[in-house]
Amino acid sequence: MSKPPISFEILSKDGETRAGLLTTRRGIIETPVFMPVGTAGTVKGMRFEVLEDELDARIILGNTYHLWLRPGVEVIRKCGGLHRFVGWERALLTDSGGFQVWSLGALRKITEEGTQFRSHLDGSLQFLSPEISMEVQAALGSEIVMAFDECAAGDAPPEVSRQSMELTARWASRSRARFDSLQSDSSDEGRTEATHEISGAQALFGIVQGGAHLDLRRESLNRTTEIGFDGYAIGGLSVGEEKGAMWRVVSDLAPALPAAQPRYLMGVGTPEDLVEAVAHGIDMFDCVLPTRNGRTGQAFTSRGKVNVKNAQWASDSMPLDDSCGCSVCKRYSRAYLRHLIVSGEMLASILLTHHNLAFFLDTMRRVRQSIRSGDFINFRREFTEGLNAYEQDKALSNT
Amino acid sequence: MSKPPISFEILSKDGETRAGLLTTRRGIIETPVFMPVGTAGTVKGMRFEVLEDELDARIILGNTYHLWLRPGVEVIRKCGGLHRFVGWERALLTDSGGFQVWSLGALRKITEEGTQFRSHLDGSLQFLSPEISMEVQAALGSEIVMAFDECAAGDAPPEVSRQSMELTARWASRSRARFDSLQSDSSDEGRTEATHEISGAQALFGIVQGGAHLDLRRESLNRTTEIGFDGYAIGGLSVGEEKGAMWRVVSDLAPALPAAQPRYLMGVGTPEDLVEAVAHGIDMFDCVLPTRNGRTGQAFTSRGKVNVKNAQWASDSMPLDDSCGCSVCKRYSRAYLRHLIVSGEMLASILLTHHNLAFFLDTMRRVRQSIRSGDFINFRREFTEGLNAYEQDKALSNT
């Protein structure tokens, strides 16, 4: 039997919750893991050195849609794939472009063949299909490739969600077929030598859709596992549905995903969401919250969210989060960070993004530790209570 | 006799060129030195850790005008001075605000008492005088305070330049008087313990004005040295005059500045300007070029300036400057940097600013080394020839 492209070992289990090791051709990733988002080949405002050294991020995301439009496949192939192009030798997961194209809304037109849309950069007419997405991701040479899917709105009625789910299933088969032929014709720019454990090829993950409808989700799961993938993702959440609907889907679906393979909840979420989803058996996450909110002046801390622009911090010499060990909290005060944000200084985005990612990654480290030591339930309760501290302070001062 | 606030020792001399050690209450600075500009309490896009660790900047600039308007003196005093506010424990030089207010052009009104102007932030009416500038700089607690001066346009006729120069001389006396009283009433937020060598107080530098007129410059020099300062600056250059006029002033004036004290050429310049001015005996420089041009996609290299946006770099895997040892050149390619700039990514500004500052600071390191080893003349020739390499390549490819 041929070797798999990735291997996944579960080290500890506590109810549905699990801590594991995901071995890729570019490094071992401890799960549950949060993957910082590097849309256009950069985690906005972060140097790769910092992601490696201080934050020890083992895997980051790249976006097929953005990189395909700019700088384009030709440039990235010439430069030897995305790792070499951007200077990051650790693992990469690339999304398929399906979600980005879906986000364009009225600008897109979906057919059986694929999606026609206008580029957000120059309005030019573009066409993306399962086959093209697989070709782009082969050129990028990421460790984990995502199938090309179609996403329905979070509040879509059953018949719309069904059509979307069925199209996703057909596209999943086409993704699988094109992916396999690309692997066998050496189009994968990230290919490495095999080890005793893994093959050095790219891995392909399937995506379960079906909106907020549990029956459709179950059907999607069956159709996706029938095709067979190296890991399974839950897509189409955090797209406008009620928070309750998201948790109904996650709590029903996550434990039903193949237990021996990594489970990835796409695009989620806040620190409390991550911990909650881990409780349902999710292993992998990505989200723009720590980076995007960092750029707009919002910090995630162990006591809850902080709006750094707030006048109350104007001469506050304390760090953002005094229980955070990141290099931003070691050196910079709330007063200074507020000054930078108010002054529109780039350093504000740099430092807040850094702190937020440090907080997310450190939270996941603590999650993993607590699972391995059989203490996840306590960790989850204390962590979640901590996140409410600022809100509670406010409530108290109003009584 | 009481101790001076700074001490300056000349280690090597080669013609007018000198290499020295400037001892401040927050560290020893090897001269000639380039001081990165940290306008609003941040060298735009740079973390202080990088300035300290990799770039080993010993002194940076802060701008009185900007910091006075935002976050204001009260906030900075509450936070314990500018060093503590921003998290930088090495030396700071603050300008006086004179040049910034002058730059506002039509928005300002100059009287004997001081300058009335409208804030660039909110249009509010503000007033800055020698006394207020000294008070703000005491609150900032910088190691080196600049006298409050008035700058004339580079092409101003003699009578305008004379009036401006005479006003600068009267403001220099008032700066000196207010500075001294602030030092004796402990208003200086950056005060340290005395050492065997220096007092722990702030130092005050005078500024020589007089436009492009050598007689006025000489008169300004006499009046400024009569008052007596810890160092002397040449102001009012790089403000629209012909490049030839600047060099006439520098070559005439620099050697005439008191030899035992540091000589600072304000707001200059390109790498070739720095080396040229060092040849005339200048010890200190500041300029926004490496930071500002970094943000707009221009890199300074040993072979000349590079427009990183240029399509010729689209799939070029070489570093910006293969003879540069900075961490940007070690890791990132021209192709990637171009992609970042073209995509409007913040990381472009971060990496190009870093490289440019590294190039300026490394150039000054090599300048100092060559002076100490008696080889400055050769260094200057080779360095300047190198800077023309790209231009020569272009000229050759056109023949």
Image (spheres, coloured by chain):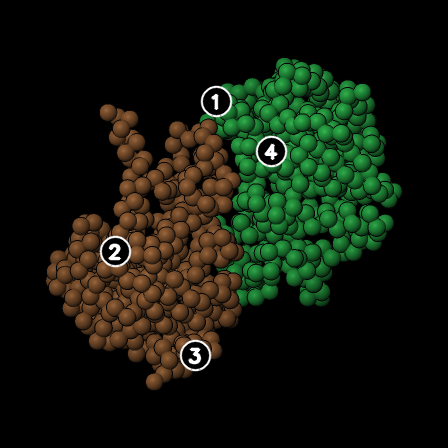
Chain colours: A green, B brown
Measured in 3D between alpha carbons, the distance from the residue under mark 2 to the one under mark 4, in whole angstroms, is: 50 Å
**Residue bearing the label numbered 1:** A124
Same subunit: marks 1 and 3: no
Looking at the rendered structure, the number of numbered marks drawn on it comes to 4
Occupied quadrant, residue B393: top left
Q: CA distance from mark 1 to mark 2?
A: 55 Å
**Which image quarter holds the N terminus of chain B?**
bottom left
Q: In the image, is B279 to the left or to the right of A353?
A: left
Q: Chain of mark 3?
A: B
Q: What percent of the width, then of the height, locates residue A178?
A: 66, 16
Q: Chain of mark 4?
A: A
Is mark 3 in CB contact (under 8 Å) with mark 2?
A: no
- Label 3 vs label 2: CA separation? 32 Å
Q: Whole-percent x and y of residue A25?
A: 68, 31
Identify residue for label 4. Answer: A62
- Is mark 1 in CB contact (under 8 Å) with mark 2? no
Residue B191 in view (yes/no):
yes
Q: Which chain is home to disc 1?
A: A
Q: Are marks 1 and 2 on the same chain?
A: no
- For the point 84% across and 50% down, the residue is A373
Q: Residue at x 37, y 37 (%)?
A: B307
Amino acid type at mark 4: Gly
User: Which mark is drawn over residue B279?
Assistant: 2
Query: On the rendered structure, is B183 left or right of A184?
Result: left
Judging by the rendered image, the residue that carries numbered circle 3 is: B196
Mark before the other along the chain sequence, 3 or 2 = 3
* Residue B66 visible somewhere in the drawing: no
